[in-house]
Image (cartoon, helix red, strand yellow):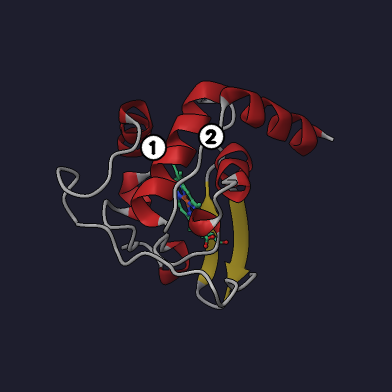
Amino acid sequence: MSSLPSSSTTAPAAPASHKEGVTADARGKMVFEGACVSCHGWSGESLVSSMATLTGSWAVNDPAATNVAQIVISGTKRYTPDGALSMPAFGNAYSDDEIAAVANHVTARFGAKGSKLTAKDVAELRQQTAQ
Ligand code: HEC
């Protein structure tokens, strides 16, 4: 995992309640609530695994949000000494628009800057992923 450039700052954990903290995109928040909150939590500090904590991660602090969208499209699986750690792929469950919205919500709520990903960006990422 890449580390952050020393000049950038990461945001602290978001509040545990969905009523507090940043909601950049109402639709993105809805997708997050339906698909992500069970593993990642409203605060970004995962109850499932510290590996799934979004707060302070490189992905949510990247204003391009490419990695966030990519991981939502494709999911991820890795093997740790404690067993397999996986995140399901949501590429088939959500539209380009919804994936862009949730990526923008996640970077705004958990990251230092927030992204402005569009449905078109997500469509391009899907094509790269398919290759
Ligand atoms: C079943 C549990 C689960 C669900 C549901 C889930 N994730 Fe994850 N997610 C994980 C796990 C586990 C990891 C860590 C994987 C790893 O480190 O290899 C992860 C990693 C991530 C990362 C990368 C964090 C980093 O360290 O850079 C992002 C971003 C992310 N998830 C966003 C989302 C979004 C957005 C959703 C909803 C669309 C979602 N996740 C739904 C389990 C989940």
Q: Earlier in the sequence, mark 1 or mark 2?
A: 1
Q: Nearer the viewer, residue 81 or 90?
A: 90
Q: CA distance from mark 1 to mark 2?
A: 8 Å
Give the amino acid at mark 2. Phe
Q: Would residue 78 be visible to someone looking at this image?
A: yes
Q: Nearer the viewer, residue 34 or 59?
A: 59
Residue depicted at 62% across the width and 45% down the height: 66
Q: Position of residue 39 (x, y in %)?
A: 36, 52
How crowded is the residue under tag 2: few (<14 C-alpha within 10 Å), some, or many (20+)? some
Q: Which residue is mark 2?
A: 90
Q: Quadrant of the C terminus?
A: top right
Which residue appears farthest toward the right when viewing the image? 131
Relative horizontal placement of residue 128, taking residue 4 as reference (left or right): right
Residue depicted at 32% across the width and 35% down the height: 29
Disc 1 beta carbon < 8 A from ligand 1? yes
Q: Which residue is mark 1?
A: 35
Q: Position of residue 109 (x, y in %)?
A: 34, 49
Q: Is residue 82 above or below residue 124?
A: below
Q: Is residue 93 above or below residue 49?
A: above
Q: How many marks?
A: 2
Residue depicted at 22% across the width and 49% down the height: 21
Q: Is residue 71 above or below residue 97?
A: below
Q: CB of mark 1 within 8 Å of CB of mark 2?
A: yes
Q: Would residue 95 be visible to someone looking at this image?
A: no
Label 1 secondary element: helix
- Give residue 33's quadrant in the image: top left
- Give residue 9's quadrant in the image: bottom left
Q: Position of residue 35 (x, y in %)?
A: 39, 37
